[in-house]
Image: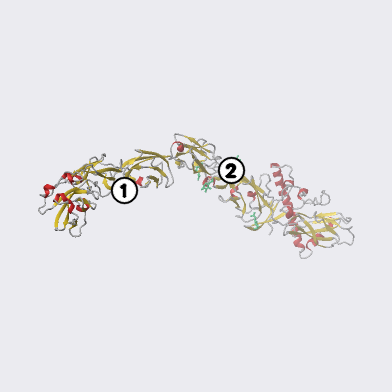
Amino acid sequence: MLNKGFSMSGLVFCFSFFLLPLHSAYGDVSYSFPEEMKRGSVIGNIAKDLGLEASRLSTRRARVDTEGNRKRYCDIHLSTGDLIVAERIDREGLCGKKASCVLKQELVLENPLELHRISLHVQDINDNSPQFKDELIKLEISESAFKGARFLLEEAHDADVAQNAVQSYTLQSNGHFILSVNTNVIELVLDKELDREQERDLTVLLSASDGGTPQRSGTVVIHVTVLDANDNAPVFNQAVYKTSLPENSPLDTVVVTVSATDADDGVNGEVTYDFGHISEENKNMFFINSKMGEIRVIGSIDYEEVSSFELRIQAKDGLGLASYSKVIIDITDINDNAPVIYLQSLTNPIPEDASPGTEVGIINVQDRDSENNRQVRCSIQQNVPFKLVPSIKNYYSLVTTGELDRELVSDYNITITATDEGSPPLSSSKTVQLSVADVNDNPPVFEEQSYKAHVTENNNSGSSVCSVTARDPDWRQNGTVIYSLLPGEVNGVPVSSFLSVNGDTGVIHAVRSFDYELFRSFKVHVVARDNGSPPLSSNVTVSVFITDVNDNSPQILYPAPEGKSFMTELVPKAAHGGSLVSKVIAVDADSGQNAWLSYHIVKSTDPRLFTIGLHSGEIRTQRDISESDSMKQNLIVSVKDNGQPSLSAICTMYLLISDNLAEVPELKDVSYDENNSKLTSYLIIALVSVSTFFFTFIIVILALRFCRRRKPRLLFDGAVAIPSAYLPPNYAEVDGAGTLRSTYNYDAYLTTGSHTSDFKFVTSYNDNTLPADQTLRKTSIDFAEALDDSDVSPEVGLQIYII
Ligand SMILES: *[C@@H]1O[C@H](CO)[C@@H](O)[C@H](O)[C@H]1NC(C)=O
Ligand SMILES: *[C@@H]1O[C@H](CO)[C@@H](O)[C@H](O)[C@H]1NC(C)=O
Ligand SMILES: *[C@@H]1O[C@H](CO)[C@@H](O)[C@H](O)[C@H]1NC(C)=O
Ligand SMILES: *[C@@H]1O[C@H](CO)[C@@H](O)[C@H](O)[C@H]1NC(C)=O
């Protein structure tokens, strides 16, 4: 048998386990040997195994052939008959993972032809290490993975087979994973949870080992990246944020910046800020920047409204884990409120007689700020008679400090200023208008101390004489002046019948017309009274002077007016030139210029014989009387006053140049040389003589009676001494010389308004009736009314009716 002939000792390599004798029914041999033997290595002595003679091999042209065109891995050594390795034999290359690897070769011998099949069993050796597909395995595992989670790993590969293939895996020890190998399924098992926040990634080494000798192994690095899970809530860096903020901080002021951190990554660690539960008001005050955590002012912060804020702040990460904190903002006061002055009460108006110290008003001052900012001082402007008296807390009384006088200052604008003690201080002021009420404390005062009024005589009644004005500075009725006449009398006549005063205007009117010749002046008192209660009054004297009007024509006293007497002057024939012959005596009831009389000869028998003194009325001869001169000389004399217009009177002077009164009968011719009959002349002479006698007699009786009663001096002897004082200053003094002692009468015609009949009052004059400072009084019907105390009432002497 061939198989029996195969000897183990014939092998170069002593691998007892694969040198198995292979039996072949047709002379086949088989050899078993390890792979990767060197070329030329002897596999076995095939000659011997086949029972062939080694020396004959070459002759029989022994050679190894392959089936088909397969590669020839072995060869025969012809001299020895050894089968040797001809090519590298790699089991993994030839057979891969097959459990047995057999190479078929044939040994061919010629002469005779023999064919032997050779089976070469290639044995595996551990020449490959286990190998992982990649050098690095990357795993991403969420940190939220639970314990026991499995992660499949790819197995390692070993080209070798059987024992030489991968037999075991080992995992480098680490804190989190263990390895689970289960029928070629290799898994990483989480044994302890991951925390990304502690370890973001970890690396473990997995090694695979085969069962060969020597053992070979391969490793792979497993890189585990821990994926984040949102397992951390944001955390504020302070539990409470305390800050203070001045009120009125401008918009956008950053109050505080809150900050929270989240350990998570990415979205999970993105913190956003917001307010927690917040009131609507606070929402309008503050704004929180959701990214930065800055809290800014967006409203007006008023300490006086809210002095502190408490805001809940929330920090939230991307997936909604939140935490909370608190911001406490204390608002600090700023002096932003000026004090406010309230007028609590005011007595307005104040009577001007209010005594100093009278409380007029109450003032309250308030300031909304706090502490020093609300400490308020109050003051009042100077120069007013008021002051502020501090009362209970923030209350002040406004009191008067002096006398008030409405007539000086009737209104006060009192400015009260309140200033707080803030810095800078704020102040405000209020003006209180106070008026002073009137008290009737001023009597009316006349503008002048006394008034003088001049009224022309004969003026219409009702004409205004003058006006008086009194002022009363008081208010309204207390200052309303009413004028009235103080009751009184002038010559026993009530003043009201002379004058009246307009109660409102003070204009004084004449109630009647005045006659200068009756009286020249009088005084009345006008009272000005106000309408107060009680009324105050004052009075003033009004002196009324009546001014003269030339309303009286001169009255010729001597000679008696023409036709009414037969007075004839005797001129001695021996009279020399310049001798006083006679004198025209005239008076004028007016005064001044109106009574300034001048005398002119208007017509004369012989113009060159007599002259008349312009002012004296004295008639003098101009030359010596001569025989040729006519015995009867008539002069017509005009007497004019100096008024505007002037009034005049005319008289006729009969002169008889004769030494003998016996020539008197011719007088009748002188008097009535024109048209009177002798009878009439005689009748007239007789009547005049009787009348003269009667008149003289009555006068004497009355004069005696009068003198007994009042003035014993009064005599009426038929002659009138012309009072020199009566005459105007320029008049020449008459020394009683000449013929002036002759008796003459004064006849006055008086015609008054309502009495048109002609009355002739014959009035006698003497010193007393013509006082120096008075004009001759004209008697009138209203006699009794017009007389002044100092005057002696002129006596009515005799009334003679002449038809
Ligand atoms: C007070 O004030 C009022 C109004 O401003 C003004 O009309 C008046 O003249 C003032 N009076 C005084 C006394 O200043
Ligand atoms: C006038 O004065 C009196 C006090 O004398 C006073 O009571 C009254 O009110 C005053 N009248 C006016 C209008 O002021
Ligand atoms: C008197 O009357 C005259 C004229 O009629 C007039 O001019 C004069 O002013 C009056 N005088 C008085 C004081 O009334
Ligand atoms: C008039 O005034 C004087 C002082 O001016 C006074 O003495 C007199 O009493 C007053 N007369 C009247 C009636 O008021």
Beta carbon at label 2 within 8 Å of ligand 4: yes
Mark sitting on residue 392: none
Mark 2: give few (<14), some (14-19) or many (20+) Cα within 10 Å.
Answer: some
Which residue is most to the top? 392
| Local secondary structure at mark 1 | helix
**Rendered location of residue 297, percent (x, y):** 40, 46
Q: Is residue 667 visible?
A: yes
Q: Out of 313 and 558, give the one closest to the viewer.
A: 313
Q: Mark 2 points at which residue?
A: 538
Residue type marked 2: Ser
Q: What distance separates the C-alpha of mark 1 from that of mark 2?
A: 107 Å
The residue sitting at 30% across, 41% down in the picture is 199
| Above-or-below relation of 154 to 111 | above
Q: Which amino acid does label 1 sit on?
A: Val
User: In the shown orientation, is residue 316 left or right of residue 589?
Assistant: left
Q: Does label 1 or label 2 sit earlier along the sequence?
A: 1
Above/below status of 360 relative to 110:
above
Residue 267 numbered tag: 1
Q: Is residue 263 left or right of residue 787?
A: left
The one nearer the camera, 722 or 331, is 331
Report x, y in % for residue 685.
76, 58
Of 626 and 539, nearer the camera is 539
Q: Where is residue 798 in the image (x, y as percent from the top left)?
A: 69, 51
Quarter of the image with the C terminus is bottom right
* Label 2 secondary element: strand
Based on the displayed image, in which of its 4 quarters is residue 324 positioned?
top left
Q: Residue at x 86, y 54 (%)?
A: 579
Q: In this view, does 531 lie above or below 459?
A: above
Instruction: Count numbered badges in the picture.
Output: 2
In terms of image quadrants, where is residue 67? bottom left
Is residue 634 shown left or right of residue 694?
right
Query: Is 74 left or right of 529, judged from the image as shown?
Result: left
